[in-house]
Image (cartoon, rainbow, N blue to C red):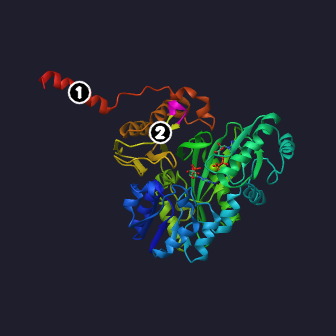
Amino acid sequence: MLRKIFIANRGEIAVRIIRACAEMGIRSVAIYSEADRFALHVKKADESYCIGSEPMSCYLNIHALVDLALATGCDAVHPGYGFLSENAQFARACKERGLIFIGPEPEVIHRMGDKTEARQAMIAAGIPVTPGSDGNLHSVNEALQVAEKIGYPVMLKATSGGGGRGIRRCDNAEELTRNYDRVISEATKAFGSADVFLEKCIVNPKHIEVQVLADHHGSVIHLYERDCSIQRRNQKLIEIAPSPQLDEAQRQYIGGLAVIAAKSVGYTNAGTVEFLLDDSGRFYFMEMNTRVQVEHTITETITGVDIVEEQIRIAAGLPLRFRQDEIVRRGYAIQFRVNAEDPKNNFLPSFGRISRYYAPGGPGVRTDTAIYTGYEIPPFYDSMVAKVIVSALTWEDAIKRGQRTLRDMGLFGIKTTIPYYLKILKHPQFRIGKFNTGFVEQNPNLVNYSDKPRPEVLASVIAAVVASHTGL
Ligand code: ADP
Ligand code: ADP
Ligand code: MG
């Protein structure tokens, strides 16, 4: 088994990995930027090292991180999500210097991280993909020709994109012409690559993704699917496992497809195969994420499998402990990404000091977060500050538990998406489990909630009343 793991990440996912290490008797090494000096992962790891003053780039410095991992005596590196997690160069640098990278082989990361190559690989494996361009586009004229052939609306996408960025829907030739250079410049800035491609836009699809685990001994299994259709601007907000929108036959079919997809590219470790589901019940491969996902938590909740622990075991060369028929699923789990944003103000980021935080609790509740009372959220990173996961045996009960839990959570000092989620939980379409990726846009009125007086305000009111009666 591994002895010491270097965590090339920050925030809640670093804390999540530290927890897995602690349970497995593995030492953990955390890193932090100066801006992250007071971050929770720094306090929780067995050892923590400051890696610089540049808030973002220090977490992306491949050679410095590999050197530090070796200098601190680590035998493996866990990249988490975001940052270097899907960077094949980083995985290769680890491997070349004798460190185990907790993820698939560098070649597989490279191939699946390139969305056009991934599409080609899936077509070769017989997996349905959306109609689209053969590889990357070379000019706006080529884009217009391809779009004419597959029919509008089309999606113009950055080949190395991620995190919901570098994607534009184009409804006609004029929009495609207008967006072409825009997406290229966005892709260059965000991902360091100007490559773009086209695929048919599936109108108001469901986003269904399948969690897979693959060991180094030829076993590949899936842990069922997640429904991530509740999105804003192609970014996930609420995720559900299993999808309330699939029947059992569809569930078996999509799980099987994901296993074929993973096997066909020699995949190892944990990964996610993302699909779109259209109104006629057809699935299309969209992309594969070669890392642990933000929403791995809900799969853990319904299956009881600790995905981060399995990642570590697989990386250590151990065979999978479960056969497909031993994976049992129970009930429903919902994850809410609590973002430091103001929904009423076009989801503007709302960083600052958390004046008070009370974690929700009770049955069927899990919180994965790196915040605490007094913590100042640095403005340099992702706005997601907590993940609240609830579970229950039925969909209806999971919704009720979600309502109770989000109200149970006390998070003061910043604006968050919590009140917005409470509105979504009341929506009839959500309650009957029928929604698609257009839900947020189709329901702009959900930001019209009233901000209830907070306990802090009430406390001062009560103090004033008490004072007036006691004459103090
Ligand atoms: P998930 O697929 O796990 O739901 P997201 O798409 O929400 O993950 O991305 C998780 C984090 O990783 C976000 O902070 C996102 O901005 C970042 N991220 C994902 N893909 C990339 C990429 N290709 N380049 C840069 N950052 C990325
Ligand atoms: P990322 O790497 O940023 O996660 P994806 O390719 O997974 O990018 O797409 C993110 C989201 O964009 C999807 O969940 C979906 O809502 C939307 N999307 C992407 N491609 C299409 C498409 N061809 N048709 C309709 N929606 C799409
Ligand atoms: Mg995706």
Residue density around tag 2, few if under 14, some if 14–19, many if 20 or more, within 10 Å: some
Look at the image and give the residue range highlighted in magenta: 343-347
Instruction: Report x, y in % for residue 3.
Output: 44, 75
Q: Earlier in the sequence, mark 2 or mark 1?
A: 2
Q: How many neighbours does mark 1 have within 10 angstroms: few (below 14), some (14-19), or many (20 or more)?
A: few
Report the quarter where the C terminus lies: top left
Residue 36 x/y as whole percent: 44, 55
* Residue picked out by circle 1: 462
Q: Is residue 456 above or below residue 189?
A: above
Q: Depth check: 97 or 265 in front?
A: 97
Asked whether, in this view, residue 121 is left or right of residue 88, the answer is: right
Seen at 52% across and 61% down, the residue is: 326
Q: Is 392 in the magenta?
A: no
Q: Which residue is mark 2?
A: 350
319 sits to left or right of 134: left
Q: Is residue 145 left or right of residue 42?
A: right
Residue 434 horizontal/vertical position (percent): 59, 35
Looking at the picture, does residue 247 appear above or below residue 289? Answer: above
